[in-house]
Amino acid sequence: MDRTRHQPPRGLLPLTPHPRTHATAADGTRIAHQLQGEGPPLVLLSGQQNNHHWWDPVRADFHATRATLTLDYRGTGDSDKPDHPYTTELLASDVVAVLDALGIDRADVYGTSLGGRVAQQLAARHPDRVGALVLGCTSPGGRHGVARDKATGRALAHPDARTARDALRHLMYTPDWLATHPGPHHTLGDPAMPAHARRQHLAASNRHDAWDLLPEIKAPTLVVHGADDLLNPTANAPLLASRIPGARLHLIPGARHAYFEEFRAVASPLVLDFLNEAARP
C-alpha cells in the first residue's frame, strides 16, 4: 500500500448522534444524512433502492475508531425523491454535498453494492475528498462488468412480489443464517420508495460504467466480496482489484451478497484493520 496517498480526515466528530438533517445538492434536492460516533469520519454507502438502515446491523462495529456518516440516497428515506434521471455520478455528487454541509474535507469511504458504484465515482472524480476506499460486493459495470446469470434475473423479476422478495433474501443470505435470523432484514429495499425512484435507482445501477475511471483512483483501496455472491457475481471483484492501482482483494468464503452483515465477524475487523493501516503515517 502506498500510504503517502492517504491523508487523515480533518478533525474528530462528536460522540453523540448528529440531529437528522439535510444537505442541499447542486440541483436543489435535499439529501438526508445521519452522523454517529467519534473519530475520523467513515462514509457508509448502501445498496440499490435502500436507505441508511442498510447499515443498522453493523454500524456500531466501526465506532471504536470512527464516526460513521450515512445518507439516504435521493429517492429513499427522508431525502427528496425527484423524478429525473439518476446516475452514479449524480449520487456521488450528493455525497460531496453532504460532506460540504458538515464541513468535512476528507473522509474514508465504504460502499457496498450500488454504494460501491457510487464510491468508485466519488474516488475517481473527487480524489481530494476520499482518504481510504473500500468497495464491497460491487462491479465496474458496463461491458467489462460480469452480469448476473439469466436464472437469477428471472427470479428477481418474478411477477409475484413475495416470490421475488424471497429470491432476493436468499441471494443476500445463506439458508443456515436465515433459519436463525428471520428478520426484519434491512437490505431488501426501502418499502416507502415511490415507483419512479425505484426505476431511477435501477437505471443508475445499470448505466454505471467506471472502467475508464478506475485507474484514476488514487486512494488506498480494499475490494471485498462474498465468494458465493450471485446477485453481483464474485468475478467482478478481481476485475476491480486489477483495474485500481495497488488495490487489495479479499473474498469471504461462503458469503453471499450481504457478507457485511452475515459475516460481520470477519468483514468488520477486516475493513477496520485496512482503514487503520491506511491512516498510519
Image (cartoon, rainbow, N blue to C red):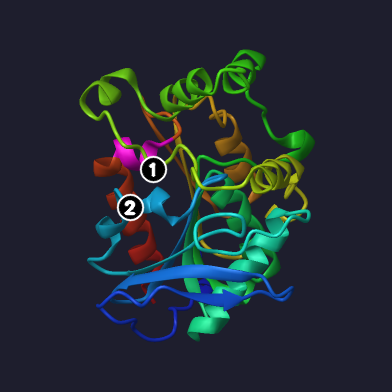
Task: Identify which residue, 248 or 224, lies in the foreground.
Answer: 224
Indicate the position of residue 78 as horizontal and vertical percent values: 50, 63
Q: Is residue 62 left or right of residue 22?
A: left
Regarding mark 1 in the picture, which secondary structure is present there?
Answer: loop
Indicate the position of residue 177 as horizontal and vertical percent values: 27, 26
Indicate the position of residue 82 as horizontal and vertical percent values: 70, 60
The amino acid type, in three-letter code, at marker 2 is Asp
Q: Residues within 10 Å of mark 1 (few under 14, many from 20)?
A: some
Disc 2: which residue? 56
Q: Can see residue 247?
A: yes
Task: Identify which residue, 214 or 44, lies in the foreground.
Answer: 44
Indicate the position of residue 129 as horizontal and vertical percent values: 57, 75
Task: Identify which residue, 18 or 195, lies in the foreground.
Answer: 195
The amino acid type, in three-letter code, at marker 1 is His
The magenta segment: 258-263
Q: Is residue 182 left or right of residue 89?
A: left
Disc 1: which residue? 186
Q: Is residue 247 magenta?
A: no
Question: Disc 1, disc 2: CB below 8 Å?
Answer: yes
